[in-house]
Amino acid sequence: MTAREIFEKAGIPNVSYNVRMADYTTFRIGGPADVMARPANREELIAVFRLCRENGLRWFFLGNGSNLLVSDEGYRGVVICPDGDFNKIEVNGYDISAGCAASMSRIAQAALQAQLAGFEFASGIPGSFGGGIYMNAGAYGSELKDVLASIDYMDEEGFHRIGPDQARLGYRTSRFMTGGGIVLGGVVHLQPGSRDEIAARIKELAEQRRSKQPLEYPSAGSMYKRPQGYYAGKLIQDAGLAGFSVGGAQISEKHCGFVINTGGATCRDVRHLTQLVAEKVDDHVGVVLEPEVRYLGPEGLEPLLEERIIDH
Ligand SMILES: Cc1cc2nc3c(=O)[nH]c(=O)nc-3n(C[C@H](O)[C@H](O)[C@H](O)COP(=O)(O)OP(=O)(O)OC[C@H]3O[C@@H](n4cnc5c(N)ncnc54)[C@H](O)[C@@H]3O)c2cc1C
């Protein structure tokens, strides 16, 4: 039986078929996923995982799709995208607990309403809380690691609650990236603050983003990680690659660290461009750029760049 037939027969709620992944990624790129399940609570999530496990179905856990490039062929399996209860946000004193599907901007708004300071840095990161923890998202000198008090996750062995230290959060990395596990939610611990100052900081950071980042185009944010001692965008600019394009994918002239979809870009265009730029920067200054954006191929996560033998 196909994944679709298995899900149709099981009668799991909130499931759709042949879903265009371009509609679920900020890059607006990606072919169809065979099945998309949107569990609204832990019970539904467990039912989806059980069905996948019992039938040997491939699955991929999706947040807000803001750090993701999906193949033009889509995904031959089940995309699990949490919804419903996983969007909940609750303020308790100086703590905010949030489900994995809650957006970083909604958490920042909740902090503002509660006059809690320390989450402003994340207000403009267009991802989910779960995706943010998985990536240890950060901006303007702070990262989630700095404010997390606890993380709830599940794996094959069950449900767990851990502290940030156990999550091995590093620069755009976590234990979930290397060791698996699904982040279900977490708690951030903030400090009392002034509403006006928090609002002003959020506004200032939003203006900085608007002036420096090509937010008018679909993208997945910074394409490459920051290499030690350098800025990827500056290296790309210095290599003369601002505006360089392949098909509909282009190195943004506003911020060379961003690859933008100028209209109709395919995954193939983005991968080709990303590869060429990494090779040219390597040739130019001998720095190997590592992608920050995750690539979902038809059969799962794969390296975005092809290896090449570097001949210095
Ligand atoms: C315009 C723009 C600006 C950006 N600015 C920043 C920035 O300032 N700082 C920054 O760090 N990032 C930035 N990003 C990148 C992106 O928003 C972050 O990496 C974000 O944390 C990704 O979250 P997501 O929910 O969109 O994850 P997705 O893109 O959906 O997924 C990314 C990875 O996380 C995994 N994942 C998602 N949810 C979970 C979960 N609950 N449990 C386990 N794994 C999960 C997925 O399987 C995938 O491998 C930017 C992106 C854009 C488009």
Image (cartoon, helix red, strand yellow):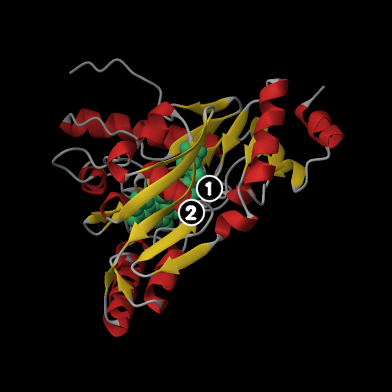
Q: Residue at x 62, y 53 (%)?
A: 83
| Residue assigned mark 2 | 128
Q: For numbered disc 2, what is the local secondary structure?
A: loop
- Where is 204 relative to 242, above or below? below
- Tell me whether circle 1 and circle 2 mark residues in contact (CB < 8 Å): yes
Q: Is residue 172 left or right of residue 18?
A: left
Using the image as rendered, state which of residue 70 and residue 156 is in the foreground.
156
Q: Identify which amino acid the numbered label 1 is placed on.
A: Gly
Q: For numbered disc 1, what is the local secondary structure?
A: loop
Q: Position of residue 50 (x, y in %)?
A: 68, 30
Mark 1 or mark 2: which comes first in sequence?
1
Q: What residue occupies the far right of the structure in this picture?
A: 9
Mark 2 near ligand 1 (CB under 8 Å)?
yes
| Residue assigned mark 1 | 63
Q: Is residue 13 left or right of residue 279?
A: right
Q: Identify which amino acid the numbered label 2 is placed on.
A: Ser
Mark 1 near ligand 1 (CB under 8 Å)?
yes
Q: What residue occupies the far left of the structure in this picture?
A: 229
Q: Is residue 220 visible?
A: no
